[in-house]
């Protein structure tokens, strides 16, 4: 594991964007695994900025996102498809047909999971997977105590996650209770994993995930076993590591 300590959120975002853009420059047809949440927003902003300056070309890139809420339409302002359009896809030259996010409106969610696994396999796996981390150590929507060997599957969100995400909805009752997420198995098969963390409120879970025992109680702890892991965080998030 390589740890990059950045001074603050902006330099953390720039460092993460550096790693992602290096991937795309060295392999223009990279498959990028992408994440939502507030942490990677600054990284996406930096990538858009470099794209506008002509420094990165996304025309041959394919993307697969980690997860999506079940029950939200792609144009719902809290869906992860909408997030990706707003924060990245609408501002760069990635081809729309090369971007993949699980379909939150799938009538048969289990079939959608199978389709998503086939999409990932069909692309030859993920070159670089970006990950944020929930306060309980979840990655994607892989919540504590789930099996490490799962591929894309339907999850019931924990109370902790519903609570944490309630700030984005008009009320807690509007937060979807279920989601589709890529499993830990698919995440661990990515050739390189880039974890981004920021803020003092993540310090304790960062310590448990990267300096504690590997356990399904802290899903992100399995990342310690990955042969090519980059952890990029600001001082606050890495303060207990
Ligand atoms: C959500 C997403 C995760 C993300 C997490 C942390 O639950 N499904 O992929 O890592 O939030 O978000 P934030 O970066 O806002 O703390």
Image (spheres, helix red, strand yellow):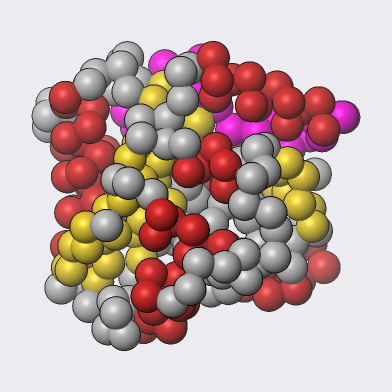
Q: Is residue 35 left or right of residue 219?
A: left
Residue 233 is inside the magenta segment: no
Tell me the residue at 57%/52% (across/down): 140
Total marks shown come to: 0
Could you tell me residue 190's position as x and y percent? Answer: 42, 36
Q: Nearer the viewer, residue 165 or 183?
A: 183
Inspect this view and state whether residue 82 appears. no
Residue 99 visible somewhere in the drawing: yes
- In front of the other: 90 or 146: 146
Q: Is residue 55 left or right of residue 57?
A: left
Quarter where residue 143 is shown: bottom right
- Specify the farthest residue to the right: 107
Q: Nearer the viewer, residue 99 or 122?
A: 122
Q: Quadrant of the N terminus?
A: bottom left
Please say whether residue 103 is one of the residues in the magenta stretch.
yes
**Residue 42 location (% of width, % of height):** 30, 55
x 47%, y 36%: residue: 189
Region of the chain picked out in magenta, as a range: 90-109
Residue at horizontal 39 percent and vertical 25 percent from the top:
31
Up-down relation of residue 76 to residue 42 (above or below):
above
* Quarter where residue 177 is shown: bottom right
* Residue 53 in the image: above or below residue 86: above
């Amino acid at each position: 594991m390589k740890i990059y300590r950045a001074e603050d959120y902006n330099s953390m975002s720039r460092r993460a964007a550096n790693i992602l853009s290096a991937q795309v420059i060295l392999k223009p047809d990279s498959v990028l695994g992408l994440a939502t949440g507030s942490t990677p927003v600054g990284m996406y902003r930096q990538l858009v900025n470099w794209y506008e300056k002509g420094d990165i070309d996304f025309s041959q890139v394919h993307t697969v996102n980690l997860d999506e809420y079940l029950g939200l339409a792609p144009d719902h302002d809290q869906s992860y498809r909408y997030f990706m359009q707003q924060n990245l896809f609408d501002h760069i030259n990635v081809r729309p047909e090369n971007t993949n996010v699980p379909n939150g409106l799938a009538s048969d969610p289990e079939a959608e999971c199978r389709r998503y696994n086939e999409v990932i396999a069909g692309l030859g796996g993920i070159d670089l997977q970006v990950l944020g981390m929930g306060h309980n150590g979840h990655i994607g929507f892989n919540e504590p105590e789930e099996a490490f060997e799962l591929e894309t599957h339907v999850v019931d969100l924990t109370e902790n996650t519903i609570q944490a995400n309630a700030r984005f909805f008009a009320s807690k009752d509007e937060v979807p209770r279920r989601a589709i997420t890529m499993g830990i198995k698919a995440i661990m098969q990515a050739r390189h994993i880039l974890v981004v963390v920021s803020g003092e409120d993540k310090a304790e879970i960062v310590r448990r995930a990267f300096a504690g025992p590997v356990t399904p109680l802290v899903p992100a702890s399995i990342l310690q076993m990955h042969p090519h892991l980059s952890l990029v965080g600001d001082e606050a998030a890495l303060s207990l590591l």
